[in-house]
Image (tube, rainbow, N blue to C red):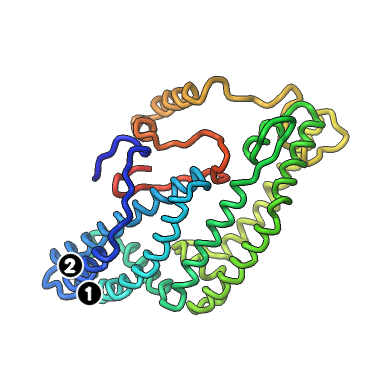
Amino acid sequence: MEEFKTFGELKYTRPDFGNIRRQLKKLGRQLKNAADYESFRSAFEGIEQLIVGMYTDNEIVSIRNTCDKTDAFYENEQKVLTRKAAVLALSLLPIGKNALKSPFRADFDAEYGEFLSRKLENMLKLMSIRTLGDEVKENRLSQQYSKDAALCSTVFRGEQCNFYGLLKHMESTDRQERREAFEAWAGLYESVSPKLDRTYDELVELRKKKAAKLGFSDYIEYIYSQRSRFDYGPADVERFRNCVRDIIVPVCAELYEKQRQRLGVDRLHYYDEELVFPEGNAVPIGTKDELVEKARRMYTEMSQETGEYFDFMCDHELFDLDTRPGKHMGGYCTFLPLYRAP
């Protein structure tokens, strides 16, 4: 495992794709011609290490791009890596095929489990030179959608706000302020909706075509395979949706009615839903650093493992908790496998 101090200190250098391709070919030949399982496993682990390195570089770029959508360097690197990685992925097709038909596959499954072989089989269904351009274009469109939403900004009651900046106003005890904040939120989307709609429409059509090129009946069948959803499918999700409708929605309706009564309004409107109590919602007490320390204490008291996990993330500065202009909307988590770091 590679060592590092903090995420901010991680150095990014664009991968040498030519060298990686040469190493893949060499390791691919070793895997194909392996005379024993040890040689086969050594080749596979070498290939895996190359992939881990590339994946880590890509995630560093992706994280820094979502932290600041105005950063032109990481925006460009994201485009370059996507294009290069898509081409390089085709080099993995013969390697995957040889690994699956190897006489040492049974030994491999015994050591690593059959799930990894199943992932390899799935990979072969999803990779094709016919969809190479589609993969690159899809990533570009997704990045554009994220950037257009992240750069939205408006002035609300004298304060420059993005979507996050409006949240506190949407929870105000002043009903008129809540309504105006929601209208400002909607106005932000309306201001950029022509761009977002065009991008989204392009993504829908592109994904449908990509699925068809790969032989799937539709995008839904494709995306379940692409996300390795081997243990459940659309029928299972439909049953889950029905359970939500039949069981959870009536409970939510009861909770909303109790909320309406607490707030003392004749009807609970969309701009009322964020205010849970008439005296105001519970708010965190303390600065960001103080709250992180409280969370650290909580996770330490929960168990040794959760404490170690949270300490690792704090010590290596693996959180980004500040609201600021240009930051990607929403929250997410990812992984830097080269450093075994969440």
Q: Position of residue 127 (x, y in %)?
A: 41, 72
Could you say which quadrant of the image residue 315 lies in?
A: top left
Mark 1 surroundings: few (<14), some (14-19) or many (≥20) residues within 10 A? some
SS for tag 1?
Answer: loop
Q: Quadrant of the N terminus?
A: top left
The residue positioned farthest toward the front in the image shown: 72
Q: Mark 1 points at which residue?
A: 102
Contact? badges 2 and 1 (CB < 8 Å) = yes
Q: In this view, does 273 lie to the left or right of 35?
A: right
The amino acid marked with disc number 1 is Ser
The residue positioned farthest toward the right in the image shown: 266
Q: Is residue 146 left or right of residue 125?
A: right
Q: Position of residue 212 (x, y in %)?
A: 54, 78
Vertical relation: 291 (above or below) 24: above
Q: Mark 2 points at which residue?
A: 40
- Total tally of numbered discs in the picture: 2
Residue under the point 65% across and 53% down: 243
Q: Where is residue 270 in the image (x, y as percent from the top left)?
A: 77, 41
